[in-house]
Amino acid sequence: MARALITDVAGLSITGEERAFLRDADPWGFILFKRNVGTPGQVRALVDAMREAVGRADAPVLVDQEGGRVQRLGPPHWPSYPPGAHYGHLFDRDPEEGLAAARLGARLIASDLAALGITVDCLPIADVPLSDADPVIGNRAYGTKASKVATIGTAVAQGLMAGGVLPVLKHLPGHGRATVDSHHRLPVVATDRKTLESSDFAAFQPLAKLPLGMTAHVVFSAIDPVAPATTSVTMVAEVIRGFIGFDGLLMSDDLSMNALSGTLAERARATLAAGCDVVLHCNGTLEQRREVAGACPPLTGEGKRRADAALSSRREPEPFDVAAAREEFAAMSASA
């Protein structure tokens, strides 16, 4: 039975040691980074090898392909895509045009990914950044108002799903107020709960039916003064599952980020104990991957139900003229 884990490999192909680890650990899914990306043929072979190692042809393969600063696949083999703020600018000028561009851009990304066997994109972002926040979100966001962010995020999710790629809602319940980058330090947001519910958390509510979500390594001290959302029973139960109403598969952000404390095994156990369904670990040595895997049990119960529901929601790509769509998208972007 698959383990409650999403993991990675070090390079462009799987080593013998990594293959043995994947076979024994049997992670639910995999994630790719730039270090795993060379040519289209190489990526496709790597994706196939990952699935062969666990013996599951439907094992999800994830990537962060947002556009802008966060784009694991790029030139010369794949196009560059604009950051989320680009769609926000189009939306401000003409809401209908902005949504059409967001949907089409995501549909084109899905076409790129599906051709490689990648079935999940860590997008859309529903974070609502403040002007004085750390720039880690910045122009990745669609805007600074919850309603606008949710509306564009919905269009992005629709575009991905039309292309046979599952979206991941991130970063629950919001990374927009963080004044430090959670890759390096633990952000603490002291904003009162009422304000958070009307702005940051509200952006996620219209997207709560998406099949997959990712947590934020952020402390919201008005609700849980100690634990970041990823490892907070209160934040997961009361805010993510409760106020926001998200019932999809909930994964952590990367366990190796410095916002979290304790050993990797302790981080994994705390994440699962808080109510996350799956642990994401994607930047470590093989020994560290083994440590995390050892702390992750088989995916059972509600976690398995959500995982199965997520995978069953993926559909084959709808008919799509890629060349014509690229021309249309370029014209939309040129007018921005």
Image: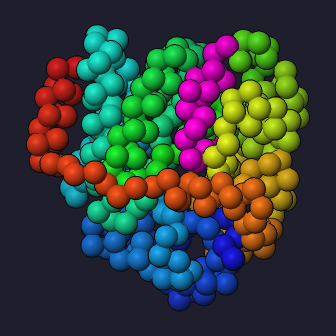
Instruction: Residue 19 in the image: state x and y as whole percent.
Output: 55, 84
Q: Residue at x 75, y 56 (%)?
A: 302
Task: State whether residue 91 is above or below residue 123.
Answer: above
Q: Residue at x 66, y 38 (%)?
A: 246
Question: Which stretch appears magenta?
Answer: 198-215
Residue in the foreground of this view, choosing between 227 and 195: 195
In what quadrant of the picture does the C terminus appear?
top left
Q: Is residue 32 left or right of residue 317?
A: right
Residue 202: tell me if it is visible: yes
Instruction: Residue 299 in the image: state x and y as whole percent.
Output: 72, 66
**Residue 127 part of the magenta segment:** no
In what quadrant of the picture does the N terminus appear?
bottom right
Residue 75: tell me if it is visible: no
Q: Is residue 67 left or right of residue 185?
A: left
**Residue 200 part of the magenta segment:** yes
Residue in the foreground of this view, choosing between 259 and 119: 119
Q: Is residue 75 left or right of residue 310?
A: left
Instruction: Residue 201 in the image: state x and y as whole percent.
Output: 66, 24
Task: State whether residue 57 is above or below residue 142.
Answer: below
Task: State whether residue 94 is above or below residue 304.
Answer: above
Instruction: Residue 310 in the image: state x and y as whole percent.
Output: 56, 54
Q: How is the image coloured?
A: rainbow
Q: Is residue 96 left or right of residue 160?
A: left
Task: State whether residue 182 is above or below residue 63.
Answer: above
Q: Residue at x 74, y 50 (%)?
A: 276
